[in-house]
Image (cartoon, rainbow, N blue to C red):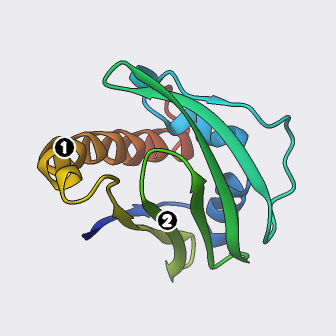
Amino acid sequence: MRHTLHYCVELPLPQKEVFDFFADVANLQRITPPWLNFSIRTPLPISMEVGAVIDFRLSLLGVPFEWKTEISAWQPPDMFIDRQINGPYAEWIHRHTFRTIDEGRTVMEDDVTYSLPSQPLGELVHPLVRSQLEKIFSYRQETILKILQGAPV
């Protein structure tokens, strides 16, 4: 079964600046909750473009795992898509979109489509997985706002 997740945040910066922040893979480390023990395994810097592959390591609920993602669409400064090619989900497609709402203000949206492995049993843990994803994306949204507004994180 496919599930979706949507998060939206208004940022007080021009679209190009917001996009450039996300184009730097090292910033992913900064916006990922510390309880995930997240690390980027691919040597930095990474040239972001269609076909770029990035390896990560993290743990969720104390279970460590590897995650490999590929950039499947790259359209600066409007959008990019990363999709899991190896990791904990049967499917994970994350679309990041950026839109100017007025001069110096940008809306950033995260749209994730995901499926859990081991169906139909995987659906039994979906409430727990959903809860964790909501915590992760809420943390991410708050942290992005703080960083891009120049506040200490």
Picture disc at residue 21: none
Whether pointer 1 and pointer 2 mark residues with C-beta atoms closer than 8 Å, the reply is: no
Amino acid at dot 2: His
Amino acid at dot 1: Ser
At label 2, counting other C-alpha atoms closer than 10 Å, the crowd grade (few under 14, some 14-19, many 20 or more) is: many
At label 1, counting other C-alpha atoms closer than 10 Å, the crowd grade (few under 14, some 14-19, many 20 or more) is: few
Q: Residue at the location (51% across, 38% down)?
A: 31
Percent x, y for residue 41? 73, 31
The secondary structure type at the circle numbered 1 is helix
Of the residues under marks 1 and 2, which one precedes in the sequence? Answer: 2
Q: Residue at the location (81% across, 67% down)?
A: 49
Please state if 137 lies on the left or on the right of 24 as rendered: left
Percent x, y for residue 100? 53, 80
Question: Which one is in front, 1 or 80?
Answer: 1
Please state if 152 lies on the left or on the right of 25 as rendered: left
Quadrant assignment, res 19: bottom right
Q: Residue at the location (52% across, 79% down)?
A: 99
Please state if 40 lies on the left or on the right of 33 as rendered: right
Residue hosting label 2: 94
Percent x, y for residue 65? 51, 30
Q: Residue at the location (78% across, 72% down)?
A: 50
Question: Which one is in front, 144 or 94?
Answer: 94
Residue hosting label 1: 131
The correct choice, above or below, for 112 with respect to 23 in the image is: below
Question: Which one is in front, 95 or 124?
Answer: 124
The answer for how far apart the CA atoms under marks 1 and 2 are is 17 Å
The secondary structure type at the circle numbered 2 is strand
Count how many numbered circles sit on residues in the image.
Answer: 2
Question: Which one is in front, 34 or 67?
Answer: 67
Please state if 27 lies on the left or on the right of 117 as rendered: right
Quadrant of the rendering where the N terminus is positioned: bottom left
Percent x, y for residue 8? 35, 66
